[in-house]
Image (cartoon, rainbow, N blue to C red):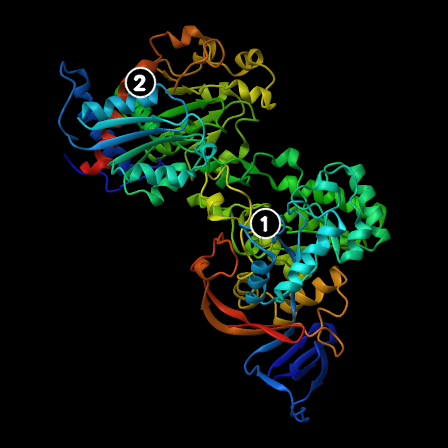
């Protein structure tokens, strides 16, 4: 296997080159087949230790990373820190140093604050993999989305991708914008102006457009990606009600008709059916939400493999 | 004891002085200026200032000394040690101690601690409102009698315009400047850095420039209405300097200060999530930084103040979202100003000294300071404009090491500090 990746830590898509991204995707392709074998295990990472350090609740991402580690024969340990480290009187750095002292090869980190993986990478000997940090990045999600798109469209370059909803607070959107524009797709974002500020026009050098309305973004799109809307945003006056949100910004069959005939629909989950996405869209054949989850394991196998020295 | 500062180049903007001149100090006061051809008294101890600039002592209008209440971050003694090492002979600590400096007893305590340390002069800033909670006025007259030179609720700016109006009217009775940290928190709350392209890129919540602009404009109108003196602390936005420039032209009694980090760094410095780049107001984008440089050059900005805000390493070793606002600044302020303002040709040494000494003394009405005219307090800052040196947090006199300038190379420094005729620091 070629070595596409010489970084120790895997912190985000923003710092990766197009070649590195393609390298990770190709590595994931190679691992994909293992997941459909009868015996879903290879000895690739035997003797390696992976700690899943989750400061924020997550079922899917944590399970996905855990399965990825186990299918590569690494020893995986899950740590869920429900309350913050500070309430126990321990600083973030202390928590990391304590785990690092147990000599894991890789620490997979999820945290509600942006930048925590970057801060830990500075003090940790183990490789740090970002499993989602605040509103910053969720790089493995963008990779699994890219894998899904490649599988169904055969390419990424030249595609028109609409990303709809709460872009401001979305790490999924940020990682996807970086990845898709680096690989030559055009990304169009839309949603309530409160959640899609105009400043996003300068977010990346080129390939990104801020659309006035969700319909403008969907029109002619090859891929429509819907983000989860959180009720808390309503409490902070970003939009009035979920009802109004679903009427004006939700993805319905009528709105999806504006996209290309063969457009596909992605959602990072968990879905709010009937709010950002109508059930008839979510359950249609154009929706690839379960494919995304499936490819997530292969992507995380690739990332763990590369982060623990396989790359 | 007599001290003769010999062979230096004396710059005293208040007196229009800018040439080689010796300064004789006697009994804590400036006794005389002595020309090169005149004879100096033989019984004076000589301080050789060859190759150096002799300036009236630098005054930092905005520091946090953390005592009483947070002595693990800084004490008045350690803060004063950092001050004199950075070239400051006087510092003005903000009232956000614990308890808050909202009464004469705390004001007196701070001054006594400073006298005990025997390094820099400390001129406390009292609170505007009791507990700085923005509702009832603090005893400004009593605090002034105890030695306070201004009032401010600093990081907890008075949100209620009606209370702020009364505070400015009342402070005017005592000729006390009202120091204003301008931030409309309804726009900035929850924010941890400047709102703009970089905050979007990093996924951190932004504090818009608008939060500062709106509050500055509100308080300029209040100053106009009341006739009180408003001093805008750590001005950081293009909009704020434009508003102050217009207000000055309109005759409103407004002065303002800028912090060195705001004219040397931008929000790009936050990219590595180093919590030593987190302060309020936040590091702004380049267009704001350029506006500050313009305002320093054209006189809109009156003073440079460091906003020295020590925090313990444990408190800064947190998530960027949760780490406290503030960085240390006493030991890097002069060096940063040499590099960014003087050696770039933006301002000359005379203007540098106005910004650090002449104007600060005027803004807080510190009689007999900010000048070396005979009879003044013998507070002197000796500058070597070409000294090469490197700043390391490990060498800092401050109890806290939260500076983003660790390892930064400098050209130009304060090399000796004299307070009340005593040499309290020498590099």
Residue B139 at least partly seen: yes
Are both tags, 1 and 2, on one chain?
A: no
Could you tell me residue A307's position as x and y percent?
A: 25, 36
* Residue B258 x %, y %: 63, 55
The residue that label 2 is drawn on is A293
Vertical arrangement, residue B420 with respect to residue B105, above or below: below
Pointer 2 local density, CA inside 10 Å: few below 14, some 14–19, many at least 20? many
**B153 with respect to A157 (left or right):** right
| Circle 1 crowding by C-alpha within 10 Å: few under 14, some 14–19, many from 20 | many
Q: Which residue is mark 1?
A: B288
Q: How many marks?
A: 2
Secondary structure category for the residue under label 1: helix
The residue drawn where x is 28% and y is 18% is A152
B189 vs B386, left or right, is: right
Question: Could you say which quadrant of the image residue B216 lies in?
Answer: top right
Estimate the x, y position of residue B244 in percent, counting from the top left. 72, 51
Pinpoint the chain carrying mark 1.
B
In space, the residues marked 1 and 2 are separated at their CA atoms by 44 Å
Local SS, label 2: helix
| Viewer-proximal residue among B112 and B93 | B112
Front residue (pair A263, A119): A119
> Is residue A281 shown above or below A70?
above
Residue closest to the eye, B243 or B76: B76
- Image coords of residue A216 (percent x, y): 49, 21
Residue B249 in view: no
Q: Nearer the observer, disc 1 or disc 2? A: 2
Q: Quadrant of the C terminus of chain A?
A: top left
Q: Is B290 displayed left or right of B408 in the figure?
A: right
- Tell me if residue A7 comes above or below residue B144 in the rendering: above
């Amino acid at each position: 296997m070629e070595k596409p990746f010489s970084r120790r830590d895997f912190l985000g898509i923003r710092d990766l080159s197009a070649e590195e991204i393609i390298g990770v995707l190709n590595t994931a392709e190679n691992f994909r087949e293992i997941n459909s074998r009868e015996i879903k295990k290879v000895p690739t990472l035997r003797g390696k230790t992976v700690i899943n350090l989750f400061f924020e609740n997550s079922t899917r991402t944590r399970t996905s990373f855990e399965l990825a580690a186990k299918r590569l024969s690494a020893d995986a340990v899950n740590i869920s820190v429900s309350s913050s480290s500070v309430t126990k009187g321990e600083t973030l750095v202390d928590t990391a140093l304590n785990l690092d002292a147990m000599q894991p090869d890789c620490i997979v980190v999820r945290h509600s604050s942006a930048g925590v993986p970057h801060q830990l990478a500075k003090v940790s000997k183990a490789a740090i993999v970002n499993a989602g940090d605040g509103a910053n990045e969720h790089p493995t999600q963008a990779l699994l989305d890219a894998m899904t798109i490649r599988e169904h469209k055969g390419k990424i370059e030249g595609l028109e991708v609409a990303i709809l909803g709460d872009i401001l607070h979305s790490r999924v959107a940020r990682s996807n914008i970086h990845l898709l524009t680096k690989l030559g797709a055009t990304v169009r974002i839309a949603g309530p102006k409160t959640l899609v500020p105009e400043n996003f026009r300068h977010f990346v050098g080129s390939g990104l457009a801020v659309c006035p309305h969700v319909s403008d973004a969907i029109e002619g799109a090859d891929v429509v990606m819907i983000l989860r809307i959180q009720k808390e945003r309503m409490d902070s006056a970003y939009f009035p009600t979920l009802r109004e949100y679903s009427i004006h910004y939700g993805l319905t069959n009528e709105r999806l008709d504006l996209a290309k005939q063969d457009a596909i629909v992605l959602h990072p989950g968990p879905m709010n059916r009937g709010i950002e996405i109508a059930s008839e869209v979510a359950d249609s054949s154009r929706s690839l939400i379960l494919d995304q989850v499936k490819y997530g394991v292969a992507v995380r196998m690739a990332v763990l493999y590369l982060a623990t020295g396989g790359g | 004891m007599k001290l003769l500062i010999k062979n230096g180049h004396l710059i005293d903007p208040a007196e229009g002085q800018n040439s080689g001149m010796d300064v004789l100090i006697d009994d804590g006061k400036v006794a005389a200026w002595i020309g090169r051809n005149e004879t100096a008294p033989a019984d004076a101890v000589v301080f050789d200032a060859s190759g150096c600039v002799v300036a009236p002592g630098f005054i930092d209008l905005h520091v946090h000394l953390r005592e009483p209440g947070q002595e693990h971050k800084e004490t008045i003694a350690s803060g004063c040690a950092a001050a004199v090492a950075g070239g400051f002979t006087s510092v003005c600590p903000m009232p956000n101690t614990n308890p808050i400096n909202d009464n004469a007893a705390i004001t007196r305590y701070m001054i006594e601690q400073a006298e005990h340390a025997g390094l820099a002069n400390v001129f406390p800033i009292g609170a505007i409102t009791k507990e700085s909670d923005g509702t009832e006025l603090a005893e400004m007259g009593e605090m002034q009698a105890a030695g306070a030179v201004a009032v401010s609720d600093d990081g907890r700016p008075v949100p209620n315009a009606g209370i702020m109006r009364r505070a400015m009217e009342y402070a005017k009775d005592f000729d006390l400047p009202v120091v204003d940290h301008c931030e409309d928190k309804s726009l900035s709350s929850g924010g941890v850095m400047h709102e703009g392209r970089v905050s979007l890129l990093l996924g951190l919540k932004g504090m818009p420039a608008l939060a500062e602009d709106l509050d500055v404009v509100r308080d300029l109108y209040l100053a106009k209405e009341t006739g009180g003196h408003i001093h805008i602390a750590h001005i950081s936005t293009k909009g704020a300097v434009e508003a102050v420039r217009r207000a000055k032209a309109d005759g409103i009694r407004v002065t303002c200060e800028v912090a060195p980090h705001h004219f040397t760094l931008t929000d790009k410095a936050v990219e590595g999530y180093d919590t030593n780049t987190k302060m309020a107001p936040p590091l702004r984008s380049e267009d704001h930084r350029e506006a500050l440089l313009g305002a320093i050059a054209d006189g809109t900005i009156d003073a440079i103040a460091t906003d020295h805000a020590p925090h313990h390493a444990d408190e800064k070793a947190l998530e960027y979202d949760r780490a406290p606002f503030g960085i240390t600044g006493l030991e890097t302020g002069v060096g940063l100003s040499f590099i960014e303002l003087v050696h770039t040709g933006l301002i000359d040494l005379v203007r540098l000294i106005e910004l650090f000494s002449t104007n600060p003394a005027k803004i807080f009405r510190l009689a007999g300071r900010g000048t070396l005219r005979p009879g003044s307090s013998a507070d002197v800052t000796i500058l070597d404009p070409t000294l090469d040196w490197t700043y390391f947090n490990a060498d800092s006199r401050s109890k806290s090491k939260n500076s983003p300038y660790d390892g930064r190379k400098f050209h130009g420094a304060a090399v000796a500090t004299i307070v009340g005729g005593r040499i309290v620091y020498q590099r």
